[in-house]
Amino acid sequence: MSTKFFTNEENNTLLEKFEGIFKHMNIHFFDALVGFFRASGYFRIYPFIKEVQEIRILVGIDVDKLTYQAYNKGLEFLPSTITTKEKFLETLKKDIQHAAYTKEVEEGMLHFIQAVLNGKIQMRIHPSKQLHAKIYIFRQKEMDKHAGWGSVITGSSNLTEAGLKSNFEFNVELRDHDDVEFATATFEKLWEEGIPLAIADVNEVKKKSYLNDEFTPFEIYVKFLIEYFDKGIDYDPDDIKDLPLNYTRLRYQVDAVNEGFEKLKRYNGFFLADVVGLGKTIVSLMIAKKFALYNGLRTRALVVYPPAMEHSWKKTVNDFNFPFAIDFIINGSLHKIKHAENYDLISLRSRDIAH
């Protein structure tokens, strides 16, 4: 039985239809009107459209959803070109980020973005209509006596990987001149109502996805450090400027101060553990000073220490000349603390460990 319909079954997929049309016709213009556009669908067809000179893709945006969201916020919503464009770009970026990372995907997407940048591909999004129609128009530059003007496919398939080959779809291919002309005229009308997708917008999508090939190995390494260590690596070695006289600024202590302060903010406490002689007392007091600047000069601090370290702690605190109140208590007298909640910062010191 001969029919113009196909359903993506028995090796008769939309993807194979694309391949056959581009192989046997000299297609110069390719237009696509889709309700949903997925970048992962484009990379499936890009091997067939490399030689096509002009490609236009018009995407329908669900403006009703935007209107509903704005209504819930108590706002009067008017179709906005900026809102529509931003919604589409965010969808496109996420689609690139979530696609399976293969060389085929990367090459296809880079081809897509480059084709947009050089003007081969034009894209528009429709701000005012809920377009669910799916139309693919293939036109030759001139009428051919054997192949005619071209071909049009319409049906249920969106320009997505699933729509091209795996979903059960119901599509039909038409090659009559009048059908191609009608589809083209309808597309032109909707295209004129669409919002152009600027080159800068697509370039921004590339920069925000793994397709950005401008990163150097060093930049990737720095990005890894930032993600892994967070703000622990974000410090200025000269950040601690006001050490007392006769105190040397040691870089490892500055590291410890910045990392400890971030942990204090994040976890509301931390352990400072190191071998004897590396300056845990100094680090603790520098963190206390940073905390006071962060928390306010009305900060109250409590130092709990072993009796044998009383002289060392009080001398160091005196050297730092703190502009806020610091109380002292030996660790054997914790029961004497009546209102611990009155303190903003507590440092508990033992012989071997402090936090």
Image (spheres, grey):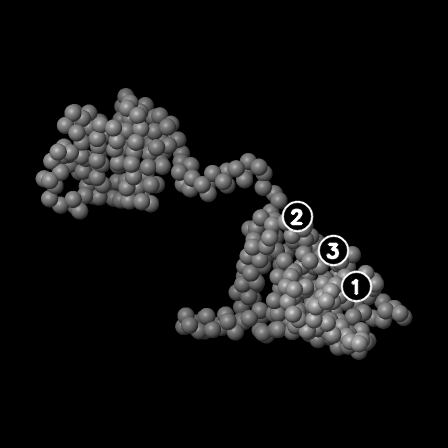
User: Gap between marks 3 and 2, in whole Å?
Assistant: 14 Å
Q: Earlier in the sequence, mark 2 or mark 1?
A: 1
Give the quadrant of the C terminus.
top left
Marks 2/1 in contact by CB < 8 Å: the verdict is no
Report whether residue 205 is seen. no
CA gap, disc 2 to disc 1?
A: 24 Å
Pointer 1 or 3: first along the chain: 1
**Residue neighbourhood size for the residue with mark 3, other residues' Cα within 10 Å, grouped as few (<14), some (14–19), many (≥20):** few
Q: State the mark number for residue 47.
A: 3
Q: Residues within 10 Å of mark 2 (few under 14, many from 20)?
A: few
Residue 103 is tagged as 2
**Structural crowding at the residue carrying mark 1, measured as other residues with C-alpha within 10 Å and reported as few (<14), some (14–19) or many (≥20):** few
Residue 275 vs residue 262, the one in the foreground: 275
On screen, residue 279 versus residue 75, left or right, reads left
State which quadrant residue 38 falls in.
bottom right
153 vs 228: above or below: below
For image coordinates 13% across by 38% down, the residue present is 334
Residue 290: % across, % down: 29, 38
Where in the figure is residue 136, as x and y percent of width and height? Answer: 72, 69
Mark 3 residue element: helix
Q: Residue flagged by tag 2: what amino acid is it?
A: Lys
- Check disc 1 and give the amino acid type: Gly
Which residue is rendered at x = 55% and y = 51% of the image? 208
Which quarter of the figure has residue 57?
A: bottom right
What separation in Å lies between label 1 and label 3 (alpha carbons)? 12 Å
- For the point 46% across and 43% down, the residue is 227
Residue at 37 percent across and 32 percent down: it is 255
Q: Nearer the viewer, residue 47 or 169?
A: 169
- Of the numbered discs in the image, which one, if any, rests on residue 20? 1
